[in-house]
Amino acid sequence: MLVDKERVRSYYRQLKEDMIDLCHTDDVVAEEWIRKAKNLRLIGAWYHYMILIRKSKDYVKETCPCYLKRLKKLLKGVENG
């Protein structure tokens, strides 16, 4: 499958901008961000996906550490699902 690199970069940048959703009090908003990030993995953009997940963990750890446990739980569900 051929992936349009510019669209992947654009999608990646948008997800980076939307990282604030991970600090939302509603779990559904954070779950939706995770689902969107998973799309990168599904289309074969593994490198972008892994960088984004690492940055998201750092972001939550620095910005809203009370949600770090929730993020890790949601990511574990993505890896298994």
Image: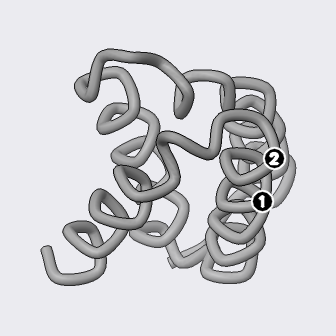
- In the rendered structure, the answer to whether residue 69 lies left or right of residue 10 reads left
Furthest residue to the left? 81
Q: Position of residue 56 (x, y in %)?
A: 68, 53
Q: Is residue 65 above or below residue 78?
A: above
- Give 16 or 58, whichever is nearer the viewer: 58
Number of the label disc, if any, that sits on residue 46: none
What residue lies at 79% left-to-right and 26% top-to-bottom?
17
* Numbered label attached to residue 58: 1
Q: Residue at x 50, y 78 (%)?
A: 1
Name the amino acid, label 1: Asp
Q: Is residue 19 above or below residue 54?
A: above
Disc 2 on helix, strand or loop? helix
6 or 26, nearer to the observer: 26
Residue at (83, 38) in percent of width and height: 13
The residue that label 2 is drawn on is: 62
> Label 2 crowding class (10 Å Cα cut-off): few <14, some 14-19, many 20+?
few
Taking the spot 20% from the left edge, 68% from the top edge, the residue there is: 77
- Callout 2, which amino acid? Glu
Left or right, residue 56 beside residue 40: right
Q: Nearer the viewer, mark 2 or mark 1?
A: 2
**Label 2, label 1: how many angstroms apart (C-alpha)?**
6 Å
Marks 2/1 in contact by CB < 8 Å: the verdict is yes
Q: Quadrant of the C terminus?
A: bottom left
Mark 1 residue element: helix
Q: Residues within 10 Å of mark 1 (few under 14, many from 20)?
A: some
Residue 26 x %, y %: 30, 17
